[in-house]
């Protein structure tokens, strides 16, 4: 439902209403953001097995429920909202990977590269946990680069979408992605 400037301004208006305590705003917001959230979830799940236990719709609903239950978030903009969505989807996938890794203790470790997004979550459970730990270390060094990786890897956001979410130029988003990717490569291949 999100289309062009009109949808963007409506989303911002609804986020402001939510900030002011309007509980019904959450439901109205879902009408406008569901398609984009589903697109992000489909991106994350597109390379998964058909019988994967976590489906895009479930990922969207769980992320939206967590958002609705969170307190203290002051929505700044549409971009901020989608940035939070990417972080929540990351947390959900990491939790899913932790659960799966616990079930398969003793299996061989999975090696990960930043280009290795085609490996299903169940097969890359250990890798997702490794990336999550690396992102935590990167955030201590450079919070913005960690956010760029999170949005790119876990939400499939483009440089343009990342730039909007972080209020930076698209060129800066691309530069931050390249720098973070190099750092991750070195960190994960020690």
Image (cartoon, helix red, strand yellow):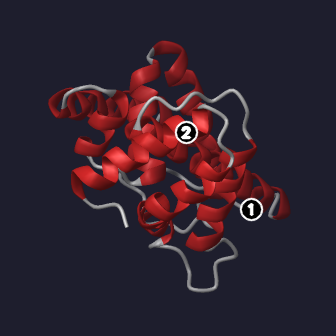
Q: Position of residue 84 (x, y in %)?
A: 53, 39
Disc 2: which residue: 17
Can you tell which quarter of the image residue 107 is in? bottom right
Q: Is residue 114 visible?
A: no
Disc 1: which residue: 107
Q: Is residue 125 left or right of 137 when viewed as pictured?
A: right
Q: Is residue 61 visible?
A: yes
Give the distance between the C-alpha atoms of the residues marked 1 and 2, in whole angstroms: 49 Å
Mark 1: few, some, or many residues within 10 Å (few <14, many ≥20)? Answer: few
Q: Is residue 107 left or right of 147 when viewed as pictured?
A: right
Name which residue lies at 25% across and 32% down. 173
Can you tell which quarter of the image residue 87 is in? top right
Name which residue lies at 61% across and 58% down. 27
2 versus 167 height, above or below? below
> Residue 156, which numbered label?
none
Direction left: furthest residue: 171
Q: Position of residue 188 (x, y in %)?
A: 49, 36
Q: Position of residue 52 (x, y in %)?
A: 64, 78
């Amino acid at each position: 439902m999100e289309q062009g400037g009109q949808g963007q301004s409506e989303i911002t208006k609804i986020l402001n209403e939510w900030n002011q305590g309007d509980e019904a705003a959450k439901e109205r917001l879902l009408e406008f953001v569901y398609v984009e959230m589903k697109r992000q979830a489909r991106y994350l799940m597109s390379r998964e097995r058909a019988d994967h236990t976590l489906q895009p719709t479930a990922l969207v609903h769980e992320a939206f429920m967590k958002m609705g239950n969170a307190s203290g978030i002051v929505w700044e903009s549409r971009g901020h909202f989608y940035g939070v969505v990417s972080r929540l989807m990351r947390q959900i996938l990491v939790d899913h990977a932790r659960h799966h890794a616990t079930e398969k203790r003793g299996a061989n470790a999975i090696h990960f590269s930043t280009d290795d997004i085609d490996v299903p979550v169940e097969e890359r459970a250990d890798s997702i946990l490794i990336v999550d730990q690396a992102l935590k270390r990167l955030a201590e060094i450079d919070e913005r680069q960690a956010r760029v990786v999170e949005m790119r890897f876990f939400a499939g956001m483009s440089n343009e979408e990342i730039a909007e979410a972080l209020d930076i130029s698209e060129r800066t988003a691309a530069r931050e992605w390249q720098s973070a990717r190099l750092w991750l490569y070195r960190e994960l291949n020690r």
